[in-house]
Amino acid sequence: MDHFELKNGALHAEDVPLETIAREVGTPVYVYSRATLTRHARVFREALSALPSVHIAFAVKSNPNLAVLHLLASEGYGADVVSEGEMRRALAAGIPARDIVFSGVGKSKRELKAAVEAGIGQFNLESEEEGVELAEIAAVLGKRASCALRVNPNVDARTHAKISTGKAENKFGVAYDVAAGIYARLAGLPGLQMRGLAVHIGSQISDLEPSRQAFIKMGALMETIRAEGHEVTHMDLGGGLGVPYKVGESLPTPDDYGRMVHDVAKDWGVTLMFEPGRVITGNSGVLVTEVIRVKQGASNPFVVVDAAMNDLARPAMYDAWHDFAAVNPTGATMVANIVGPICESSDTFAMGREIDAVKAGDFGVFRTAGAYGATMANTYNSRALVPEVMVDGEKWGLVANRIEPETILAAERVPEWLKQA
Ligand code: LLP
């Protein structure tokens, strides 16, 4: 459910016509709905309410915009971060350090130190080597870092290969069979407080069975580790719940997910931790674009829009589908290819798709663009970095400026020695 709907024939974000934003800010522009974000945050929390002790850490990577983080902080969400940059954002948004989980396979020494100094609540260690480094850093600072060990359960999440993380060949976590041994060794280091386990098998998960299998395996591992005399008080079950990208597509709901987790984990006697990203932000945002022109094609016409793969990389990277809709639909439809202006063929949003009929100068949206949208934007082809807007009822405002190519150019230099050469 989202709040991007037709009202009097025009597509709105809550009570604001998207055309108003498109004209005032220019396109392309991401538009987020506050009511949708809040609703998703509450639905997800509610779905876990039967569990005894829960901590939800929003996966900042899915949408790190400061206003989005601020809103989720006010909903009581913690944060799952994967870099010092994300950590600084979460702190800047008012998320307490103790509610922040630091994940990621390549945390640098500098990042580990910064996170220990900030008092981050939990490090999800991805290797024994990382644990040893962190123990030394924390000991030097006279602290003990709270940690969970991320385990690779070797379960296929049955999602797109590029966003699958829980198979043995993936780089994430430590192998299941050696995890208990690593846990025991790390628990003996004075700089660490080993308190739990973590797992995350992939993103845009559309079938709960692999997650169930992974969680059952984690429960068994927890028992083994406890039987060896170590404490396990926290279990981080990661994120990954998918969202519908197509009208009418049916996916497991947060309630289905909550029931599955309850089934598997209700008696574990731990604080269960979750790292949802897409399920909170995905359907809370759209990317608004203007049709530059409609060009004749070999079979279908090309609708050339002013958004491109640098603004929304998902179709080019993962063959992802984003529904397209006209902002002021006429009721007519057309079969078209939707493409951006970038000079490569992967800059394609849709091929041979039936869409609302559009012509040059019309505005349209790509839906379900709130997760892994603006955050994956870049400036390829010396294009601007796309701006972001938040809507709240009739109110709206910029939450990230467009960063113009001139600003980026101004950060570049031609050294004197190169000029002389
Ligand atoms: N926790 C960890 C350790 C993760 O690696 C991720 C996502 C999440 C939580 C959040 O997963 P979510 O609930 O959003 O599925 N750029 C890709 C998605 C990459 C996901 C990376 N990790 C895309 O656009 O589909």
Image (tube, helix red, strand yellow):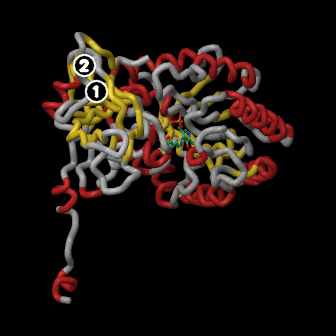
Q: Residues within 10 Å of mark 2 (few under 14, many from 20)?
A: few
Q: Could you tell me which residue is drawn at 30 percent across and 53 percent down? A: 342
> Which image quarter: residue 291?
top left
Q: Nearer the viewer, residue 67 or 418?
A: 418
Q: What residue occupies the far right of the structure in this picture?
A: 227
102 or 391: which is nearer to us? 391
Residue visible at 53% across and 45% down?
Answer: 102
Against 177, residue 390 (above or below) is above
- Residue reaching furthest left? 24
Quarter holding residue 227? top right
Q: Which residue is mark 2?
A: 330
Q: How many marks?
A: 2
From where the camera sits, is residue 253 visible? yes
Residue picked out by circle 1: 357
SS for tag 2? loop
Q: Is residue 240 left or right of residue 270?
A: left
Separation of marks 1 and 2 at Cα, in angstroms: 7 Å
Does residue 375 appear anywhere in the picture? no
| Rendering coords of residue 263 (x, y %) | 74, 19
